[in-house]
Image (cartoon, coloured by chain):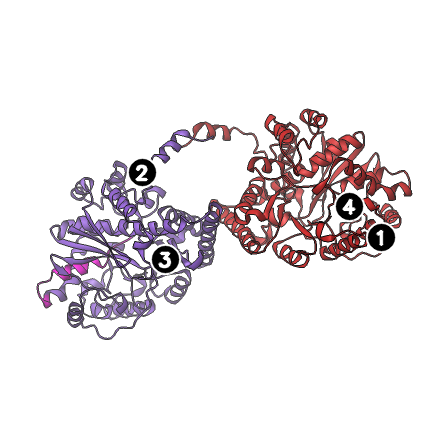
Chain colours: A purple, B red
Amino acid sequence: MVDIATRVHNHRWKIDPIVRSLIDTDFYKLLMCQSVFRNKPDTQVTFSLINRTKSVRLADLVDEGELREQLDHIRSLSLSRGESTWMRGNTFYGKRQMFTPEFMDWFEALRLPPYHLEKRDGQYELTFEGSWPEVMLWEIPALAVLMELRSRAVLNQMGKFELQVLYARAMTKLWEKVERLRGVEGLRIADFGTRRRHSFLWQDWCVQAMGEGLGETFVGTSNCLIAKNRDLEAIGTNAHELPMVYAALAEDDAALARAPYEVLSDWHEEHDGNLRMILPDTYGTAGFLENAPDWLAGWTGIRIDSGDPATGAETAIRWWQERGEDPRQKLIIFSDGLDEEKIIALHAQFAGRVRVSFGWGTLLTNDFRGLTPEDALAPFSLVCKAVAANGRPTVKLSDNPRKAMGPAEEIARYKRVFGVGEQEEQAVVV
Amino acid sequence: MVDIATRVHNHRWKIDPIVRSLIDTDFYKLLMCQSVFRNKPDTQVTFSLINRTKSVRLADLVDEGELREQLDHIRSLSLSRGESTWMRGNTFYGKRQMFTPEFMDWFEALRLPPYHLEKRDGQYELTFEGSWPEVMLWEIPALAVLMELRSRAVLNQMGKFELQVLYARAMTKLWEKVERLRGVEGLRIADFGTRRRHSFLWQDWCVQAMGEGLGETFVGTSNCLIAKNRDLEAIGTNAHELPMVYAALAEDDAALARAPYEVLSDWHEEHDGNLRMILPDTYGTAGFLENAPDWLAGWTGIRIDSGDPATGAETAIRWWQERGEDPRQKLIIFSDGLDEEKIIALHAQFAGRVRVSFGWGTLLTNDFRGLTPEDALAPFSLVCKAVAANGRPTVKLSDNPRKAMGPAEEIARYKRVFGVGEQEEQAVVV
């Protein structure tokens, strides 16, 4: 029987919204947002979309009108009562009331600020300006909208059964990864694939398939909406935007050198346990660890998000040993460019020496490589970053010069201040 | 929105019926049924299920109670008004009123006769006795029920996503065949896969996918219900049961030798055009053609259903040439153990020399080989055959001794009467 009401309802949609909830975002965004709301609420920032894969000409593929409709729809969203209840009442990382009543009152009233959109050279220039806690919440939905509109542009050309076979192939591909991971003892993997997912429904499918296929090995998802709907742990800690904006706000070189530690000092006051994760690579891991205050060595672990991951992990282990900490009590989270083979290899290398966990992103939720002619659905490297704070440009160095961001003279200054020398180039997978 | 009524309705089903219509059967069964109804309505026959794949222990896999429920459900079926309208009003092979009003009146009143079911040595002994036009209609639904109950027995062990990935893999497998066939100019393929399909829904999917993927190359399906529902051509002519029963009814060796030609003489009166297809292998193709009356060389074509198909086709072409016929005007239908590679090879060998068409069966609608541990869903060789007529055993020789059927002394007698010497053994694919 056809549900006539549902059918009529579906047909009168003006658009098929890609992002339908303010918590269809990464958990760490909400944690960071609360921290910013508490510590730097008046900072004015600019976030900007950057497509590192120039060969994917987004402005040729994606209709500007459709993009505006999707972005406008996101601006119409506000936190629903059920979402608010979940944030206020749920246990995150073993803690109740992770989000304070003050923050929740603010978040419940929030609508996302305006965006600025232009076409240039086959790409979209999409920027967001305003107060940091508001603007920062654009990052994930903006990325998800562009990724999914690009998917739709390609899918629009395909027949009904061709589409079904496309998803059949993608499902098979993911399941083969699950089967390879299933045999590995003690593995812990979370979904980190919201920002560059093929689509919302596909991410939701991948998360559920991981749950059935991997059982306890699958520890949760960074996506709050999916975590809520599927009764999973919401996973995530913090990201580069905190040190990048803190650093941009620094008045002189001495303040700049202190900025990354100030971020973690603020975080230290707010969080404990598994949320005390260091992200050391914003201005070079080696220098960051060398100059770190002793209390940081007491933190739970380190997330490795650029550079050669095994090298990064060895550096971290040595650092803990030098500071008198037992690495076997520490946690390393790998989250850069992972696929199942790299996960298995890194786990084999480090399990037993340190606690290991994996944040698996793009190649979990968007591995459509090889499934269409000319690889038109292959994932690409789209980011949305803080590019300025209170009128000053931000800088990111990372452990891979190809991921560096910012004006050249500022990059040079940051390299000098943080003592970053030659860096090894790594291909940016996604 | 959930359609509550549908959900309640689904939950109160006692069983999920596998065969839901008397026309969920092969078109040639209905054509033959009408011929039998006209020419031999009072013949008493026994049909019997035979599992040639002894390693598949059906009685261990399939619950007897469930099997009885499915068979009982089939006995409760009668032709619906829409089905009757389709049979009476549709054009088959370019002809209106293919089915006579007398036959349709009888068919509309028909319920299938009782069955007899016993377990022996891990197999089911399933037999049907009664008048030929009634009993013969059990063949296809009986096979379809056992094939699908075996599928269900295996599927029952699987998780939700494991199931989805299973079908994803099967879809991908079929689509890859479609992609290989798509490039071949002038190909003509019909679905002949009802009897050994994985399930009804899967056959329905395969047929639709073939339609989208192959366009004009896909000429129709042998399944009447799917042909009706999907607005496709119903395809099929005649089968071994006609010569087998006619032969068993023969009073002496001379009558036996005439029997296969009497079948086609009766058919000649009823049908013309593309329905005049010779199935020459029941008692050996070579002898059948050698002794055939001249008017048979005027028929449209030959269906090759056992033995080496290329050898059979060369034999047919030579025979037409010897009888002064132009093979390029003739049609050869290959229908035995086909998969896409064999289809492509046979088409390459014979296209241009003769008109070629393919009836693709088990490996179209049930190629689950390699998709489950221990290949628990691989298709197997189940048949349901006329084993006796008016108290006498039937015999089939075919062009492959492994497909021979009947008591040993009768096989020897038939071989003598039809002059069948040494035959080359061929593996029975499915």
Q: Position of residue A113 (x, y in %)?
A: 18, 46
**Mark 4 vs mark 3, CA separation in Å:** 61 Å
Q: Residue furthest bottom?
A: A422
* Foreground residue among A90 and A147: A147
Check disc 2 and report the residue beneath it.
A14
Label disc, if present, on residue A379 of the rendered structure: 3
Disc nearest the viewer among 2 and 1: 2
Labels 4 and 3 within one chain: no
Inspect the image, locate mark 3, and give the three-letter code of the amino acid beneath it: Pro
Labels 3 and 1 within one chain: no
Q: Residue at x 11, y 51 (%)?
A: A42
Q: Secondary structure at mark 4?
A: loop
Q: Secondary structure at mark 1?
A: loop
Disc nearest the viewer among 4 and 3: 4
Check disc 4 and report the residue beneath it.
B298
Quadrant of image for the C terminus of chain A: bottom left
Q: Residues within 10 Å of mark 2 (few under 14, many from 20)?
A: few
Q: Secondary structure at mark 3?
A: loop
**Mark 2 vs mark 4, CA separation in Å:** 63 Å
**Mark 3 vs mark 1, CA separation in Å:** 64 Å
Q: Residues within 10 Å of mark 1 (few under 14, many from 20)?
A: some
Q: Which residues are magenta?
A: A236-254
* Foreground residue among B170 and A252: B170
- Residue A20 is left or right of residue B129, and the answer is left
Check disc 1 and report the residue beneath it.
B420
Q: Residues within 10 Å of mark 3 (few under 14, many from 20)?
A: many
Q: Earlier in the sequence, mark 4 or mark 1?
A: 4
